Amino acid sequence: QLQIQESGPGLVKPSETLSLRCTVFGDSISSTRNSWGWIRQSPGKGLEWIGGIFHTGTAYYNPSLKSRVTTSVDMSKNQFSLKLSAVTAADTAMYYCARVRNADFDYWGQGTLVTVSS
Amino acid sequence: DIQMTQSPSSLSASIGDRVTITCRASQSISTFLNWYQQKPGKAPKLLIYGGSSLLSGVPSRFSGSGSGTDFTLTINSLQPEDFATYYCQQSYNTRFPTFGGGTKVEVK
């Protein structure tokens, strides 16, 4: 059974960089069929696509966040990572990792809450 | 980007009711429409993809229909475990998927 586990600091200061890592168990991120992505959900709000990445490193992002997002993959550790720079309180959210199948999300991590506060 | 609009934003229903949730896309997306269920404190769970295909293990009381811009999620004979928030998501633009605002199904 495929599982995805997010890890990262729960608290980030304003203007700093949020870093999240997702570890995949039960599937290889080098699969050519899928990409791997991030979705966030602000408290009490809906779902927002952040971006996705293929094992090749090819990435694609939400245009509204593109200038602040960088992503990477580490196939040796079966991990993919997200960095979001210059965070503000508006970036406070639950951040989810997911497997992206045909632009749908068939497996999700449990989510990690990131709070932006000084 | 493709805007997804769900209605209603919330509804109240009883066990055994038939529930219908609608989702409208700002442009035609063929059948590239997916439905998710989210329970409090949990990650969303994919229920239906491609407009009407049930993911393996999803109860048959869930069904999806529609094409173009208008889509429907139907839950026949609502069960206690179905009280949750439901989201639609378009996968027509594979590089920028977008979600609807959600529909919360509550106990009447």
Image: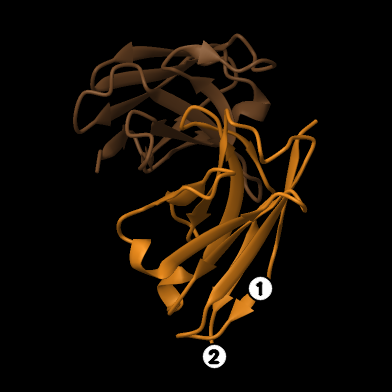
Chain colours: A orange, B brown
Q: Check disc 1 and report its element: helix, strand or loop.
A: loop
Distance CA(mark 2)–CA(mark 1): 12 Å
Residue B37: quadrant of the picture: top right
Q: Residue furthest left?
A: B27
Q: Amino acid at mark 1?
A: Gly
Q: Residues within 10 Å of mark 1 (few under 14, many from 20)?
A: some
Q: Residue at x 57, y 33 (%)?
A: A34
Side of A111 relative to A93 (left or right): right
C-beta proximity under 8 Å, tags 2 and 1: no
Q: Residue at x 57, y 28 (%)?
A: A33
Q: Residue at x 49, y 47 (%)?
A: A52
Residue A58 coordinates in the image, percent (x, y): 47, 47
Q: Residue furthest bottom?
A: A118
Q: Amino acid at mark 2?
A: Ser
Q: Is residue A61 above or below residue A35?
A: below
Query: Is residue A2 at least partly visible in the picture?
Result: yes
